[in-house]
Image (tube, rainbow, N blue to C red):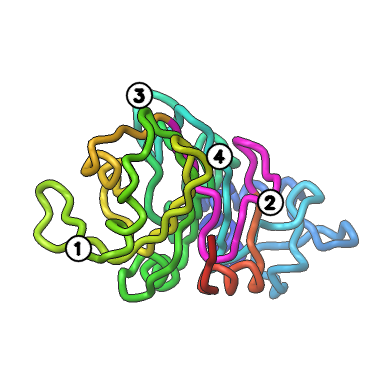
Amino acid sequence: MRLVRLIANLGYGSRKEVAWMFREGRITDPDGEVLYADDKVEHAHIRIDGEPLDPPTGLVLMMHKPLGVTCSRKDKGRVVYDLLPPRYRVRDPALSTVGRLDRDTSGLLLFTDDGALLHRIISPRAEVAKMYEATLAQDLRGDEQALFASGTLMLESETTPLLPAKLEVLTPRHVRLCITEGRYHQVRRMFAATGNHVETLQRTAVGRLQLDGLQAGAWRQLDANDVARLFEPATL
């Protein structure tokens, strides 16, 4: 029953449903030979309806999250899991978002079922760089670069100042910002602290991993080289 449990944990169905898939002959090897539930077969050599199995535990995905979608499993509106194959919602261990982007923020969103990796990415100690582009409601007042870089900016209702952040001014109302924390609505609150308002916001990179032309709503699996890029220093 090892194969039944493996395939069920990947979200293809309950154990009862997967056992029935074996009986129907839908689970085969790469040559189309029918497999049985008690066979000993490597993960890479299993096919369901001719398609390879999803990756085992340790899956890491990136998505270009579109606007209007929530980083939640349950919400009245559309959620990011609606953009993935349905079985990804019920994998065990669970596939979780690595941090969140709010409904009105688009851009690079990560998913993983590797809890240790998730905590490594979001831990403030890791200082993983997150790059954003924002358009603002008003012109910059002129001191934002120095203020954000100072490490003294205190957000409303917070008790510790933000770590230094790098701001690149593209136009008076269009900026790039690199932060190494992930506080609640941090970028929006940083500009609110200067009396401004963020009108549009997109996360363009984590570390040196970038969207690289990935279209809104699309996603792809990351390999070991991609994951390593998450922890490389980013520059504006």
Q: Is residue 173 magenta?
A: no
Crowdedness of circle 3 by 10 Å Cα count: few (<14), some, many (20+)?
few
The type of residue carrying mark 3 is: Lys
Residue 86: image tag: 4
Mark 4 or 1, nearer chain start? 4
Location of residue 232 (image quadrant):
bottom right
Badge 4 marks a residue whose secondary structure is helix
Relative image position of residue 117 (x, y in whole percent): 44, 71
Residue type indicated by callout 2: Asp
Front position in the image: 75 or 204: 204
Res 79 visible: no
Dot 3: what SS? loop
Q: Which residue is mark 2?
A: 212
Q: Which residue is mark 1?
A: 152
Residue at 55 percent of width and 39 percent of height: 86
Q: Are marks 2 and 4 in contact (CB under 8 Å)?
A: no
Sequence-wise first label, 4 or 3: 3
Q: Quadrant of residue 150 in the image?
A: bottom left
Q: What distance separates the C-alpha of mark 2 from that of mark 3?
A: 31 Å
Q: Which residues are magenta?
A: 200-219
Identify residue type, mark 4. Answer: Pro
**Mark 2 or 3, which is nearer the eye?**
2
Q: Which residue is mark 3?
A: 76
For mark 2, give the secondary structure. loop
Quadrant holding the N terminus: bottom right
Answer yes or no: is residue 162 visible. yes
- Answer with left or right where residue 148 lies relative to residue 48: left
In front of the other: 161 or 25: 161
Looking at marks 2 and 4 on the same chain, the residue that comes earlier in the sequence is marked by 4
How far across and down, in percent of the image, does residue 85 sit? 60, 41
Q: Which mark sits nearer the N-terminus, 2 or 3?
A: 3
Q: Residue at x 9, y 48 (%)?
A: 157
